[in-house]
Amino acid sequence: MQSVTVTGRFVDQNRNPIAGRVRFIPSRLFLVEHGVTWATRAPEVDLVEGRFSVELSRTDQHHVDWFYVVDSPMGAMIVKIQDDGPLKLVDLLPKKTA
């Protein structure tokens, strides 16, 4: 099962690192690849100086649309992992439009 490294950093309004945990909750618990069933990666990590690094399963390897819910000290967000890594969490978030 192909995995991708995703990194990120959480800071407050004054650019101070935020403490806490980040959970990556997959919308699919299992994936099938070449007839083999794999558990989807679902890491939970502590922020160290506001930073983290995790290995996640790609969300575009199968014929079913799925995603991760990222539960963080800054709130929850939905991301899809559709590129080779390493990737930054901020680059996976939807872009703001004016």
Image (tube, grey):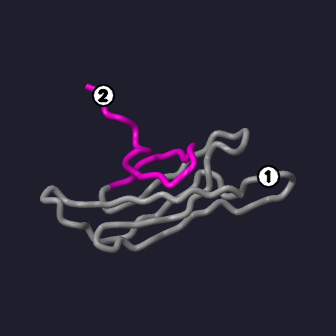
Residue range of the region highlighted in magenta in the rendering: 75-98
Q: Nearer the viewer, residue 38 or 76?
A: 38
Look at the numbered disc 1 and give the secondary structure of its residue.
strand
Q: Which residue is mark 2?
A: 97
- Compute the Cα span from label 1 to label 2: 37 Å
Across and down, in percent, residue 30 comes to 71, 57
Q: Nearer the viewer, residue 46 or 29?
A: 46
Q: Is residue 50 magenta?
A: no
Which residue lies at the image location 59% right of the left edge and 51% below the top edge? 27
Say what amino acid the circle numbered 1 marks: Glu
Q: Is residue 82 magenta?
A: yes
- Image quadrant containing the N terminus: bottom right
- Please identify the quarter of the rendering in which residue 62 is found: top right
Mark 1 or mark 2: whose residue is earlier in sequence? 1
Which residue lies at the image location 64% right of the left edge and 39% below the top edge? 65
Q: Nearer the viewer, residue 48 or 40?
A: 48
Q: Which residue is mark 1?
A: 33
Across and down, in percent, residue 3 comes to 62, 58
